[in-house]
Every structure is written in C-alpha cells, then in structure tokens.
Amino acid sequence: MAARPPERIEVDGLVLRRHQPSDVAALVIAVNESADHLRPWMPWAGQPATVDSMSTFVKSAIADFDSGRNWGYLLVAPTPETVVGSSGLHGRRRAGTLEIGYWVHRQWTRRGIASTAAAALTDVAFTIDGIERVEIHCDETNIASAGVPRRLGFELEAVVPKAPEAPGETGREMVWVATRPRTPKK
Ligand SMILES: CC(C)(COP(=O)(O)OP(=O)(O)OC[C@H]1O[C@@H](n2cnc3c(N)ncnc32)[C@H](O)[C@@H]1OP(=O)(O)O)[C@@H](O)C(=O)NCCC(=O)NCCS
C-alpha cells in the first residue's frame, strides 16, 4: 500500500500533475475562459480569476499536497501542453474516505476528461493505506457532474440537504460512492 498519491499520473493521453508556481498564468486564462460554465457550480468562480487569486490558490494547493490534506492535480493535455481542467482527492469527509472533485475547461468537455481523471484518482485512492471509500458529491441538478460517477459505476448512496454555496445549487446534494474492491480469498 502507498502512503500518499503520486505527483504525476499519465493515463489515456491525459496528464494529472501536482501544481507548480509557473501554472498561475495558464490557470487564470483557463478559469476565465470557462467562467460562465463554472460559475453555477464552483463557489470560487463568482469573481474573475486574477494572478493574485490563482497565486494564492496554487500556493495553498502545493502546501496541501505536501501536508497530505488534499491532493490537487492540474489536468493537462500534452503537445502542446494545455491546461484542460483540475481534479483532486480531498480528505474532508469521514476517516477512511477521500472525495474527488473536478472541473474541465469548457472547450474540452464531453471528451471523457473528467471521467478519465476520476477513474485514475479512484484507483490511486484505493492504493492508499486506510482508504475504504471514494465519494463524489454534486448538486442533484448538475447533470454533467453526476454523469461522471454514473459512467464510472459509482453507486448513488444518498441525496442529502446541503446549504447552497454556488448559484446553480438547489440545496440537495447527491452522494456517489465507490468502495474498495475486495481481494478474492484464495
Ligand atoms: C462536470 C464536468 C467536470 C464534466 O467534465 P467532462 O470532461 O465533460 O465529463 P465527461 O466527458 O467525462 O462526461 C462523463 C459523462 O457525464 C455526462 N455528461 C457530461 N457532460 C454532460 C452534459 N453537459 N449534459 C449531459 N450529460 C453530460 C455524460 O453521460 C458523459 O458521458 P458520455 O459523454 O459518454 O455520454 C464539466 O462539465 C464541468 O467542468 N462542469 C462545471 C464544473 C462542475 O460542475 N464541476 C463539478 C462540481 S460537483
């Protein structure tokens, strides 16, 4: 078993890699180009991204990755290297559980990028000591987001009340769950 996720994952032509300070400019562009698409669902997208706001985000992503609180990854399409989104494993739920979050640049949606990233991060999560569950949470009306765990075979465990934090949220959140695959007994 691993103690922590890797710094870089390459899967199906997509690179997931931890953030670095030089990512700030590309993130400002990607987030602002996707603003209308992100704003309904991502609480932080209510204001335009700036060099200051993305520098703060990247610094905290780097610190969190090092401290093992959250493992955030930039989603990058290679040649030419292009930022196409972001995803991560977050330890903000109960013990033994990691949650996956994601967003994809609006020009790169419906190509399986979020599904590819979430599938890779689910596999990684179950290599970590003590992790038994992976969850994906999304608003009940966020059809695109719910499509990812549905496509990956997660189970819709519950729909729970949650105070809205972004303008598209209705106050009802889906909780999708994958549990650690059992090793067959010999
Ligand atoms: C949610 C989001 C990350 C999906 O990214 P993506 O890379 O387009 O997702 P995928 O291509 O892997 O799609 C997986 C499945 O979800 C469903 N889906 C995705 N976008 C959809 C849409 N706009 N309408 C209906 N279904 C959709 C489909 O079933 C799709 O599988 P298919 O294309 O084989 O039919 C992207 O739409 C996004 O960034 N949205 C704004 C931010 C956000 O909502 N983040 C999640 C917050 S919980």
Image (cartoon, rainbow, N blue to C red):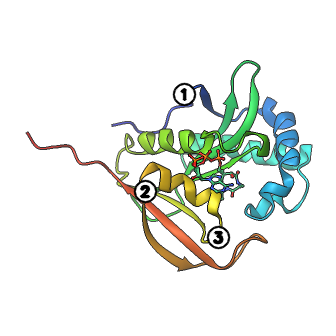
How dense is the environment of label 1, judged by Cα within 10 Å: few (below 14), some, or many (20 and up)? few
Q: Position of residue 163 (x, y in %)?
A: 66, 79
Residue at the image position 54 percent from the left and 70 percent from the top: 174
Residue at the image position 41 percent from the left and 39 percent from the top: 3
Q: Amino acid at mark 1?
A: Asp
Q: CA distance from mark 3 to mark 2?
A: 17 Å
Residue at disc 3, secondary structure: loop
- Cβ at disc 2 under 8 Å from ligand 1: no
Q: Are marks 3 and 2 in contact (CB under 8 Å)?
A: no
Residue located beneath label 3 in the image: 141
Q: CA distance from mark 1 to mark 3?
A: 29 Å
Figure quadrant of the N terminus:
top left
User: Which disc number belongs to residue 154?
Assistant: 2
Q: Position of residue 56 (x, y in %)?
A: 81, 48
Question: On screen, 10 above or below 97?
Answer: above
Residue 70 in view? no
Q: Amino acid at mark 3?
A: Thr
Q: Residue furthest front?
A: 110
User: Which disc number belongs to residue 12?
Assistant: 1
Q: Quadrant of residue 63?
A: top right
